[in-house]
Image (cartoon, rainbow, N blue to C red):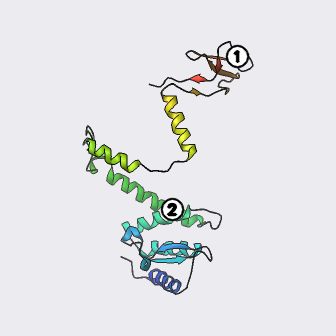
Amino acid sequence: MFIENKYTKTYFNIIRSRQTLSRCKKDSYYESHHIIPRCLGGDNKKTNLVLLTAKEHYLCHLLLIKMTEGKARSKMCLGLKCLSQMKNHKQQRRPTSRMFERFRIEANKAISDNHARLSGPANPQYGKPSPNRGVVMSDEQKKKISNALKGIGRSETHKQNLVLNHRCRRGHDVWNKGKKTGPNGSMWVNNGSVNKKIKSTDPLPEGYTKGRILAWR
């Protein structure tokens, strides 16, 4: 899996030395690192995880690129690219311009190769209709989906947005109420069935209210 070179030895020396430390995320800022990357067959077991500082984590991912070749190296370049884009108030990784250019080119090439492998005639589904097209769900399937969605917690804001969206689509609510919608300060008004624009400085016509009624189909 890994090339036998000085980078591999350095990598595992770092891992072994950090495994002997009693680190805890509550005490300081640490990041969980997969000793054998998941994309190379590693798992989420404790034996495959070690806590590293942000600097150590970044260094280990640099070493992983030097330790691999072929597709594995491309995956490690993608991993470093993702790691370099992570930012928060506790850490920020900034590779040198030369390193960034080299690994960015390799990462983009890996993405292009993967896209080419899964697009066009190379895709096993190329030219075939969707397997779910025209499939009618049975009452039992519908019931399973309904039961799976029951009990999902939604915030009050989410519920209000769902109700508002439903009403607008059915033409029962007013959209853009009182907002200026034109370059000259115009706005929509309605009398319950007819919409029209007026200047925002003009008084409301008798029987009209601000807003526009949408009749979505």
Position of residue 157 relative to residue 59, above or below, is above
Element type where label 1 sits in the image: loop
Q: Which numbered marker is on residue 82? A: 2
User: Quick one: 96 or 173, which is closer to the camera?
Assistant: 173
In percent of width and height, residue 143 lies at: 32, 45
Pick the residue in front: 51 or 94. 51
Quadrant position of the N terminus in the picture: bottom left
Judging by the rendered image, the residue that carries numbered circle 1 is: 204
Q: Examine the rendering and report whether any part of residue 102 can be seen.
A: no
Nearer to the camera, 63 or 134: 134
What x and y, as percent, mark residue 204? 70, 16
Quarter of the rendering containing residue 39: bottom left
At label 2, the amino acid type is Cys
**Amino acid type indicated by mark 1:** Leu
Q: In this view, does 87 lie to the left or right of 170?
A: right
**Image position of 114 with respect to 63: above or below:** above
Is tag 2's residue or tag 1's residue first in the polypeptide sequence?
Answer: 2
In 3D space, how far apart are the residues under numbered discs 2 and 1 (Cα atoms)? 55 Å
Give the quadrant of the C terminus.
Answer: top left
- Contact, mark 2 vs mark 1 (Cβ under 8 Å): no
* Residue found at x 51% / y 24%: 171
